[in-house]
Image (cartoon, rainbow, N blue to C red):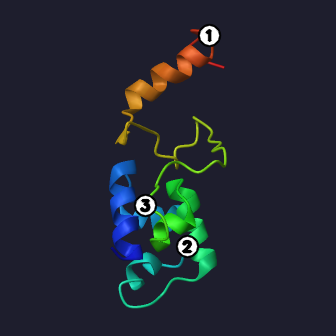
Amino acid sequence: MTVLDRIKKVSKKRGFSLTQVNDKANLGKNTIYSWKTKEPSINNLKAVADVLNVSVDYLLGKTDDNSISKKPKHVDIADDDVIMTFEGKPIPPEDLELMKRLLRGGRNND
């Protein structure tokens, strides 16, 4: 399995398209797609691994353990650029609103 194949597999599991992963990793346009024919830089590979929450070693095929990395992930639930998922599926906007309301103690507004 190639680096690109592993990225596709994990991206799909996390509910992301390759374009979304590319953008979230702040890579140049279509950088991930270029990895069909050339090797990624270690910095770009690390950025993608961080987005997908896996190790660089997994993406390189040095391990089959794709468990979530030990680095804690911090996101702001109000950030519309973040696609929140549960069990690999995106959380619908209406459910996110309910979660926000619950986290605010049942209040509708701040």
Residue on which disc 2 sits: 45
Q: Quadrant of residue 100?
A: top right
- Of mark 3 and mark 1, the one earlier in the sequence is 3
The three-letter code of the residue at mark 3 reads Asp
- Which residue is depicted at the point 35% across and 50% down? 13
Q: Where 56 falls versus 98 (above or below)?
A: below
| Residue 107 position within the rendered picture, expressed as x and y whole percent measured from the top left | 59, 10
- Which residue is depicted at the point 58% across and 83% down? 41
Q: Where 40 falls versus 78 (above or below)?
A: below
Residue on which disc 3 sits: 64
Q: Is mark 1 on a helix, strand or loop?
A: loop
Q: Where 14 falls versus 101 (above or below)?
A: below
Q: Residues within 10 Å of mark 2 (few under 14, many from 20)?
A: many
Disc 1 from disc 2: Cα separation: 40 Å
| Residue 85 position within the rendered picture, expressed as x and y whole percent measured from the top left | 42, 39
The three-letter code of the residue at mark 1 reads Gly
